[in-house]
Structure formats: C-alpha cells, structure tokens
Image (cartoon, rainbow, N blue to C red):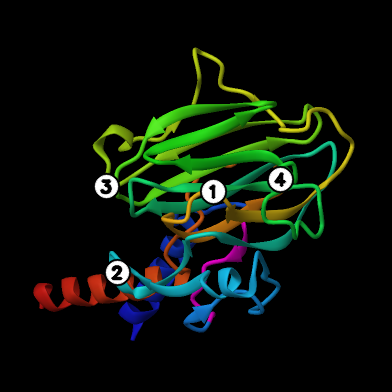
Amino acid sequence: MKWMQCVLGFGLCLAATLPASAAYVQVDNFESRSLGALAGQGAWVGTGSAAQIAAQVVEPDPANASNKVLHRVGLGGVYIPINIPDATTATFYLRFRRSVATSDDVFGLSDVAAPTTLTDFSYFEAQSGINNTNLRARDAGVNNNLATLQDAWYSMWLVVNTTTDSWQGYLQSNDDPTYATQTQMSVSGDNTFTFRNGAATNPLVTLLIKASNGPTTSTFYDDVYLDLAGQNLTVPVVPEPASGVLLAIAGLASLRRRRR
C-alpha cells in the first residue's frame, strides 16, 4: 500500500496549493435556502409591501438548474446584516445577471441597520446597480454608467474604504467577451467613487438589494462574500480541498494502472 500513501501525500500537498480566497467569508450562496421567498430565511429581511417582499425569491439558476440563486424581481427588496468597521479596507464580492433590458436594480452597502423604506435610496453609501442595460456606480450625488451588460453572469468586486469613504469596482464575466478578464471600472479616467452621503465615521452594517422604480426589473444574484482583510480580487468560490485530493488519487491510480 506504499503507492496509496504516496498518492494521499501528493493529494494533500495538492490541496494545500489550490488557489485560496484568503479571508473571504460567505454572506450567502443560497444553496442552503428553501425555494421561495428569501425574506425570513437566515438573517434576510424584506422591504416593500407584503406582496413585493414575497416576490423576492430563491429559485434555480436559469443557466444551471442545480444552482440556487436570488431572483430580485419587480418592485421590492431584501437586506442582510454585515459589518465593515470604520477605518477599514474591505472587499465585497457578488455575482449578478440581468435578464431583461428594462431593469432598474440597485445594490450596495449601507450604514443603516434597518433600511426598511423601499423608496429611500439615501440608505446607500457604496452604491452600484443596473439601469436598463447599464452597470452604474453612484459617485456622491451622481449616477455614472460604467459598462453595457449582456444577459450574462458577471462577477463584481467592490473594494470599500471606510477611511476615505469611497470604493472601487472591478468586473469580470466568463460569458461576455468584453469582460473576459477582470477590468477596473472607471468614468473619464476616475476609478474611485465617493460614498453617496459623503464623509462619515460610521461602519457599513447592511447589504441592500432593491428596486422601487422598475416594475419590470428581473435580476439574479449569487455567491455573496465579504473580506475584511483588505483588497481581495480573487474569486471566492474555489474547489473544496477534498475534491482536489480525490482528483489526485484518481489521476495517480490511473497512471499506476497504465504502468503495470
């Protein structure tokens, strides 16, 4: 059985060298959620009327039925507690996909613990969103178009600085050739966006996703992560180390059979 010991040793070494996502902590990937309304599951809270809250649902990914995602549809929204202290650089990661060309979705981070009023967008500090086919960034009092979005999944990194009360955004997509490689978002050469409400000394305590102006909005969200250790432009969804070990065992066992 010496060969098996070698295989296991190799597999453990391989697992140790798999790409890591450092200090990312999962906020939600929706896999443990039941299909149906998200509000009330875990720490998620709804905003809007009862019917609007009920319409924000967990459902199968349109591109992969075995994967669960949040479908933010019509008017209404959801939020969940997070914690980015003041005087911190942190990275907020999520994936999104617009499914119609008439979306008006807003997502981002707030310093308000209970942003319950659907029509109040002053809750946001680091604010991005989707307006029709445009990805937007709020820079203090101005909304700026950053990118034209396809009906495709995108990864987005928001690197948030609560010392300077600003953020930077990065975009990548495996389905949109324009963003096949990770690209920093900018407007006329400016790649740093000021919090919506300007300077403050508050921590960011809520992730908020909502729409109050787009009744035909339909956007999917998945894989929400947070890293409080600083800028982290890696993808937090990586193979489990055990999977790497099993692949190593299978591969080396096959090689040994061929050498007999």
Q: Mark 4: which amino acid?
A: Ala
Can you identify the residue that label 4 sits on? 229
Residue type, mark 1 in image: Asn
- Disc number lying in front (1 or 4): 1
Residue under circle 2? Answer: 64
Residue that badge 3 annotates: 175
Classify mark 1: helix, strand or loop. loop
The amino acid pointed to by label 3 is Asp
Residue at x 34%, y 35% (from the top left corner): 181
The quarter of the picture where residue 28 lies is bottom right
Question: Magenta residues: mostly which secondary structure?
Answer: loop
Q: How many C-alpha atoms fall within 10 Å of the one at disc 3: few (<14), some, or many (≥20)?
A: few
Q: Secondary structure at mark 4?
A: loop
Q: Nearer the viewer, residue 151 or 46?
A: 46
In this view, which residue lies farthest toward the right?
201
Q: Is residue 233 visible?
A: no
